[in-house]
Image (cartoon, helix red, strand yellow):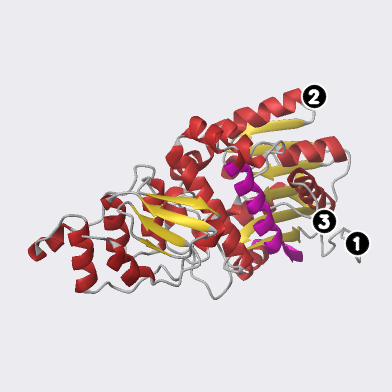
Amino acid sequence: MSLQRLLDDLFGRDLPIAIECYDGSRVGPIDPPATVRINSPAGVQRIVTGRANELAFARAYVAGEIDIEGDIFAVLELRERFDQPPLSLSVLRNAAAAIGISNVRSLSRLRPPDPPPEEVKLHGRLHGKSRDAAAISAHYDVSNAFYELFLGPSMTYSCALFEHEDDSLDRAQWSKYDLICRKLDLREGKRLLDIGCGWGGMVLHAARTYGVHAVGVTISREQFEYARKRIVDAGLSDRVEIRLEDYRDVHDGPYDAISSIGMFEHVGKRRLATYMSQAMRLLTPRGRFLNHAITRPLVSEPGIIPGGFVSRYVFPDGELLELGEIVTGMHEAGFEVRHSETLREHYDRTLRHWVANLEARWDEAVAEVGVARARIWRLYMAGSALAFAIDEIQVHQVLAVRLDGGKSGMPLRPDW
């Protein structure tokens, strides 16, 4: 039986993209910006049993049951249209017949295939140290060479700052680090702690450009080794230290400034007070703390991207808080919040750079980490770009200060 009727029932004929099945069935325009190819009966089975929703498509793509050719953004822009109500019995019968299940009594066999093995499953207490370490390792200990393919020379895995339309990605990442350094009032001789230092970009910039003494902490083994080598190669071992250490285990304050860039999403609401109190304890009076994090609008539900794909395959245990929760957490820890800034549109642009870089070096990425993991990163980065573009998720820099007898040490009108 042809799958044409099933495609018509599921998607209609007025799609701006094309959807093609392995039997030649097709819907959509003749010359589309993108084509979704359903490669096998397993792809049909997964999509139908998943009500053609986002998670079903994501799993089918990761498993190779479907392909996305052309502009992936054109496909993902339609994700709400693909989120179907429960399918009628006639649609299920059509699907069953098309993949070789002709007996109506056998519709119970029309169950989804198992999830791809790349789906992350964690154990232990949520946001306990061991579970957090496993969650971080699942995402960041993939392959430094893989990250280099799309992050570029800066090896910076957070929102860039595009001061001009034609800024390169590396220039925009430099601008982001420099803005943070100015907000923190970094100067020669000051001491900086970077929580979740990644591959060392912030501490390198702060030491090289502003002459600070810096400590960067991460719980990713791969990041630790990479960042430590970068420091040695830059000749900054006398001013920068990289530690394989949980932020909760840092006890060598005081620091004049603390930065946290793209790490807060791993903290979790239940650890919010612990995180803010730790930053307060480690700061000197009049010291500044900048928290740069993805956030969610007040009206949205907690999570990263609706449908669960990112939490299952990309950032296990990741949590997005609303800006007000972050500000309240800072106040409850004793900070005075001095400034908040959103860079939402900048993250959309940053992610589009990463997607373009990944697609341009696709064969190298597949050779390094395998096709399933390369597909995961392509899908999550493109989906995240669109989520930022439509204000489904946000990113904020929040600057706070530890007061000293009511004195902040801040200028009346900062000039950053």
Question: What residue is drawn where x is 33% and y is 74%?
Answer: 85
At label 2, the amino acid type is Gly
| Viewer-side residue, 207 vs 63 | 63
Rendered location of residue 306, percent (x, y): 46, 64
In reply to whether residue 351 is colored magenta, the answer given is yes
Do the residues under discs 1 and 3 have CB atoms within 8 angstroms?
A: no
Kindly indicate the quadrant of the structure image that contains residue 403: bottom right
Which of discs 1 and 3 lies nearer the camera? The answer is 3
Residue, disc 2: 235
Of helix, strand and loop, which one carries label 1? loop
Residue, disc 1: 411
| Viewer-side residue, 42 vs 247 | 42
Q: Residues within 10 Å of mark 1 (few under 14, many from 20)?
A: few
Residue, disc 3: 163
Per the model, the C-alpha gap separating discs 2 and 1 is 34 Å
In reply to whether residue 209 is colored magenta, the answer given is no
